[in-house]
Amino acid sequence: MKVVAFNGSPRAKGNTYNGLITVLEELNREGMETELVQLGGRKVYGCMACFKCYENKNKRCARRDDEMNTFIDKIVEADGVIIGSPVYFSNVSTEVKALIDRCGMVAKANDDMLQKKVGAGVIAVRRAGATFAYSAINFFFGISQMIIPGSCYWNMGLGRNPGEILKDEEGIQTFKVLGQNMAWLLKKLHE
Ligand SMILES: Cc1cc2nc3c(=O)[nH]c(=O)nc-3n(C[C@H](O)[C@H](O)[C@H](O)COP(=O)(O)O)c2cc1C
């Protein structure tokens, strides 16, 4: 089983990254194949509302501007998806929102192509707004008919400068339990 994780922060080795690899390590320990994709800082743009995805129905976005379709392909091929985001003004990063809007619309245009995949959000935050960003990601998974595992707290870790999140013991524990629960759920779904 494969899980693809997106780092929505332009800081490739920042707090979101550290949160994500904590989850991925647990998934690897449980025998899952994982891939970490750097999304933050890439040239990704928003949905054009052209609705060509409803005409084409080819599991791809019609906007030919960037690597978005390679990201959508990775999600289609995976059994589990993790979207990691820093909190930016109480919401997800711009790149994460672009992924949600474009992949979300392509999924709707293709008979809810993400249904029954497992999805989890991972949030890095300095102080406030984490639950809003966490909700934004989970709203996408929910309307896509995906299945969302929980953890012992909401999936967020506190930190400002790169690496500070590692000092947030409760946050790191939450990410570890999330990885364990995601692996458990994937195994149940595929047994
Ligand atoms: C544009 C911008 C907006 C931010 N907005 C918030 C915010 O609303 N709330 C907050 O607690 N931290 C905010 N932060 C701080 C980041 O969420 C925090 O530093 C986080 O750990 C960054 O994760 P990263 O290292 O993966 O980039 C903001 C940072 C930036 C650059």
Image (cartoon, helix red, strand yellow):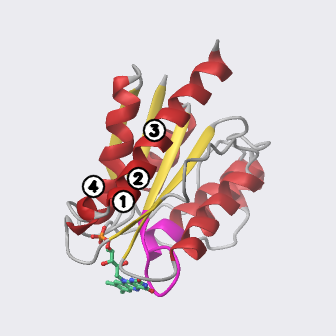
Read off the residue under disc 4: 18
Ligand 1 has an atom within 8 Å of the beta carbon of the residue at disc 4: yes
Instruction: Answer whether labels 3 and 4 touch (C-beta < 8 Å).
Output: no
Q: Which residues are magenta?
A: 85-97
Looking at the rendered structure, the kind of residue marked 2 is: Phe
- Which residue of the protein is positioned furthest toward the bottom in this rendering? 89
Residue 6, numbered circle? 2
Secondary structure beneath label 4:
helix
Mark 4 / mark 2, whichever is N-terminal: 2
Looking at the rendered structure, the kind of residue marked 4 is: Asn
x and y percentages locating residue 174 in the rendered image: 45, 51
- Residue 173 shows up from this direction: yes
Cα distance in 3D space between marks 3 and 2: 15 Å
- Residue 78 shows up from this direction: no
- Which residue of the protein is positioned furthest toward the top in this rendering? 191
Secondary structure beneath label 2:
strand
- Which residue of the protein is positioned furthest toward the right in this rendering? 111
**Vertical position of residue 153 compared to residue 43: above or below:** above
Ligand 1 has an atom within 8 Å of the beta carbon of the residue at disc 2: no
- Of badges 1 and 3, nearer the viewer stands 3
Instruction: Answer whether labels 2 and 1 touch (C-beta < 8 Å).
Output: yes
Ligand 1 has an atom within 8 Å of the beta carbon of the residue at disc 1: no
Q: Is residue 101 magenta?
A: no
x and y percentages locating residue 31 in the rendered image: 39, 19
**Vertical position of residue 130 compared to residue 21: above or below:** below
Mark 1 / mark 4, whichever is N-terminal: 4
x and y percentages locating residue 103 in the rendered image: 60, 55
